[in-house]
Amino acid sequence: EVKNSGRNGWQFYTRELQQKSEQRHAMLQALILAINENKLSCHYQPIIDIHSGQVVRCEALARWQRNDGSYVPPYEFITLAEESGLINRIDTLMLENACEQLLASFPDGDIGLSINVSPRLFHSKDHALELWLEKISRYSQNIEITVEITERLITANTDKALGVLSELKEMGVKIAIDDFGTGYSSLGYLVRFPVDIIKIDIEFISKLGRDEGAETLVETILGMADKLGMACVAEGIELSEQLTFLKAQGCQFGQGFYLAKPMPLESFQQFVQQANQRSDTN
Ligand code: C2E
Ligand code: MG
Ligand code: MG
Ligand code: MG
């Protein structure tokens, strides 16, 4: 309450602000330490062909476990990392760790990797982008890599983004639009940019079965993607009814707690073994 609060109120307000900035600073220091000590890890969430049940790839998600065993919510430290520029190091570390782990666990290369990248990396002034591209180019020879970008990346610096995405395409890397439907850019970019996959945001999937508008939107996105020759992944499937709807509408891939939660490498390996064995005998 700043309004009409007089001198004491103002002091209270600034003290609170100062506390917030101290907390942020402490968290930033802890994050730098965690990165330097290689304490960030990858969890893997299966992306599944919902008609066959096969796991086709996984999304690598950053996890930060504090010394007391608790996890810091990703939106907290990813936001902080984006604001401070640390995200470039996280994105590169995640790429490297995930590729090394997947190569060791799936030497046949039959499980692809979907990796998130922050718009900041594309606009970095140091050599972060070159370093990241170099790693992608090396690993993509043995792993099918999909890079997940947001609409934000495309709208921020269109020419640069187009150049980098074309370079990725030449390496055989797939491009996915993450959280599709939540951005504010015009749809024109879908035909101007080399997009392979649309990830329909959880916001729409969670409303299936109780909101006709959301159902119409999902059907429309699926139809549009099909016409444009793009595949769709439905994000955040939590209920069997949602899965049934998506199957009936011809959505090919799904991801969500109903199918599988993000998990450490060992559990992911077991999950793949069971799921892909089951679908082989179908
Ligand atoms: P995202 O890329 O959209 O990742 C999917 C998020 O949805 C993950 O959250 C995942 O745990 C969550 N999710 C999956 N299925 C369900 C479901 O059925 N229900 C619900 N409620 N949630 C589901 P997470 O792991 O908390 O990550 C949040 C965001 O942080 C990610 O959203 C991504 O934008 C960002 N992020 C995570 N790791 C990285 C990274 O290495 N680099 C960058 N740049 N961003 C990252
Ligand atoms: Mg993602
Ligand atoms: Mg997403
Ligand atoms: Mg999201």
Image: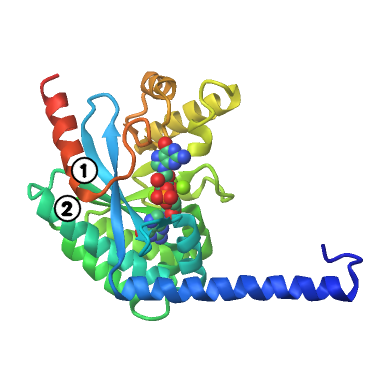
| Label 2: how many Cα within 10 Å (few below 14, some 14–19, many 20+) | many
Q: Is residue 153 left or right of residue 50?
A: right
Question: Which of the two residues, 162 or 178, is positioned nearer the viewer here?
Answer: 178
The numbered mark, 1 or 2, whose residue comes first in the sequence reads 2
- According to the image, label 1 marks what residue? 267
Which residue is at 48% across, 43% downward? 180
Residue 259 rendering spot, x and y as whole percentages: 32, 31
> Cβ(mark 2) to ligand 1 < 8 Å?
no
Above/below status of 138 relative to 56: below
* Residue type, label 1: Ser
Residue 266 rendering spot, x and y as whole percentages: 18, 47
State the image quarter where residue 254 is shown. top left
- According to the image, label 2 marks what residue? 102
Residue 208 rendering spot, x and y as whole percentages: 51, 25
Q: Which mark is residue 169?
A: none
CA distance for labels 1 and 2: 13 Å
| Label 1: how many Cα within 10 Å (few below 14, some 14–19, many 20+) | few
Q: Is residue 83 visible?
A: yes
Which residue is at 52% across, 70% downward? 83
